[in-house]
């Protein structure tokens, strides 16, 4: 492994990481890197209502921390630019599929969407913001537009890229009029609350046109709320991936139930009469969950749900006790046909004259562990390749600093 760049500056130090020792980082489709840093500063304040020049007034020093977000080009990472600064702790940092918008989620329930002005990364404007009161955002993602590309390894020797790479005809997360993909975001809070909202097209077009001056209008959006499960629970780790049928696959683990990884299918739709005002509806269905064995002091540190060769795969990372490294497991969703007893087969009995063929088999789903590996270092993140034709993934480790 080779270090390509190492950027140092007065804006960053060893204390710039968050309390969880994790620096949020995301790379867009346009090779723009967005990362977060925590900075603290000493601000003096006076009490007693004295004048500004009154030296006798008592003064105290307050340690104020701010979460800053920076962007840089992956080719020239030493030229970085600040996007925004906030007193709230940033918990989610996500790019849109086309790399034009940056989604920020904060502890406290605030969500912001930023966009560069006039396609320049040194000047950013706030487009939208939404709030889920008294909630902590743990996951946020833009709607999937249904566009995708897959690599065919059997045609890797072909000259033309159009033959090597095949377009995927997936269903968008949310379809509007005429089946056109709608733009929006879906959020998941630490208490198991789902929130989703659509992005107005007119406002998006106006902001992309490069509105100048302080007259730029920031639009506040009202999200639709829905509980992902029957009961609310404290979510520690979660992962989300779109499915070919348009639904979103969500996996999460709870702090009080470490031996269970719950899986849900979340679908979005627009309800209401066509041509009139339609509202967003969220529906969640429980899927087959993963039941883990004895953890022996280990704790789940990361979850990653992805699709490899049209199969659902979940990577589960554990933090071993006493600093003994970490462990990574791979679970694959398998589908089997189970035989149904003759008494439970429909359509054949009862003398009702039905000519339907009895159901001799029923499809069942289960998660199976197909591999695991022990690592000597702590795991910081799990990344998958852009075209996962095989089960290839990358791991990011934490250093002592």
Image (cartoon, rainbow, N blue to C red):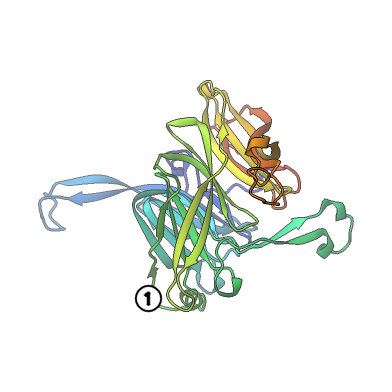
Q: Residue at x 86, y 64 (%)?
A: 160
Determine which residue is flagged by label 1.
214
> Residue 51: in sight, yes or no?
yes
Judge whether 394 appears above or below 149 on screen: above
**Could you tell me which residue is drawn at 39 percent across and 61 percent down?**
130
Whether residue 10 is visible to the viewer of this picture, yes or no, is no
Q: Is residue 240 left or right of residue 16?
A: right
Badge 1 element:
loop
Toward the viewer: 317 or 144?
144
Closer-to-camera residue (89/313): 313
Residue 129 % position (x, y): 40, 63
The quadrant where residue 110 appears: bottom left
Give the quadrant of the N terminus.
Answer: top right
What is the tally of numbered marks visible in this picture?
1
Image: 265 above or below 209: above
Q: Position of residue 32 (x, y in %)?
A: 59, 59
Of residues 322 and 352, the one drawn nearer to the viewer in this rendering:
352
Residue density around tag 1, few if under 14, some if 14–19, many if 20 or more, within 10 Å: few
Q: Position of residue 346 (x, y in %)?
A: 64, 44
Asked whether 33 or 60 is in front, the reply is 33
- Image spot of residue 275 (x, y percent): 47, 79
The picture quadrant where one finds residue 360 is top right
Q: With respect to residue 287, does 103 lie above or below?
A: below
Left or right: where 101 falls relative to 395: left
Left or right, 366 with respect to 217, comes to: right
């Amino acid at each position: 492994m080779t270090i390509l760049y190492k950027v140092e500056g007065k804006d960053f130090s060893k204390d710039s990481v968050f309390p969880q020792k994790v620096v949020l980082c995301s790379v867009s489709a346009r090779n723009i890197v967005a990362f977060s840093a925590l900075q603290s500063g000493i601000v003096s304040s006076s009490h007693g209502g004295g004048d500004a020049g009154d030296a006798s007034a008592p003064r105290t020093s307050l340690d104020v921390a701010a979460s800053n977000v920076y962007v840089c080009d992956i080719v020239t990472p030493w030229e970085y630019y600040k996007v925004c600064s906030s007193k709230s702790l940033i918990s989610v940092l996500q790019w849109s599929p086309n790399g034009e918008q940056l989604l920020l989620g904060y502890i406290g329930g605030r969500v912001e969407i930023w966009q560069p002005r006039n396609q320049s990364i040194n000047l950013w404007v706030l487009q939208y913001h939404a709030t889920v009161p008294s909630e902590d955002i743990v996951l946020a993602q833009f709607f999937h537009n249904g566009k995708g590309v897959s690599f065919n390894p059997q045609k890797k020797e072909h000259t033309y890229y159009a033959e090597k790479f095949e377009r995927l005809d997936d269903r968008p997360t949310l379809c509007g009029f005429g089946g056109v993909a709608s733009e929006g975001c879906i959020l998941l809070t630490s208490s198991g609350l789902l929130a989703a909202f659509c992005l107005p097209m007119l406002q998006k077009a106006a902001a992309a046109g490069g509105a100048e001056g302080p007259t730029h209008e920031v639009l506040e959006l009202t999200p639709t709320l829905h509980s992902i499960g029957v009961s609310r629970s404290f979510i520690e780790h979660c992962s989300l991936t779109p499915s070919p049928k348009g639904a979103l696959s969500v996996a999460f683990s709870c702090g009080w139930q470490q031996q269970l990884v719950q899986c849900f299918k979340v679908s979005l739709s627009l309800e209401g009469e066509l041509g009139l005002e339609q509202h967003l509806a969220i529906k969640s269905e429980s899927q087959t969950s993963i039941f883990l064995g004895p953890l022996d002091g280990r704790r789940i540190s990361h979850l990653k749900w992805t699709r490899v060769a049209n199969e659902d795969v979940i990577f589960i990372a554990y933090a071993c006790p006493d600093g003994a490294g970490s462990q990574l497991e791979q679970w694959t969703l398998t589908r089997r046909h189970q035989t149904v007893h003759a008494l439970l087969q429909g359509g054949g009995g009862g003398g009702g004259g039905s000519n339907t063929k009895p159901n001799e088999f029923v499809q069942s789903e289960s998660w199976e562990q197909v591999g695991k590996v022990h690592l000597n270092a702590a795991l910081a993140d799990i990344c998958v390749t852009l075209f996962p034709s095989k089960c290839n993934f990358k791991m990011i480790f934490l250093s002592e600093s």
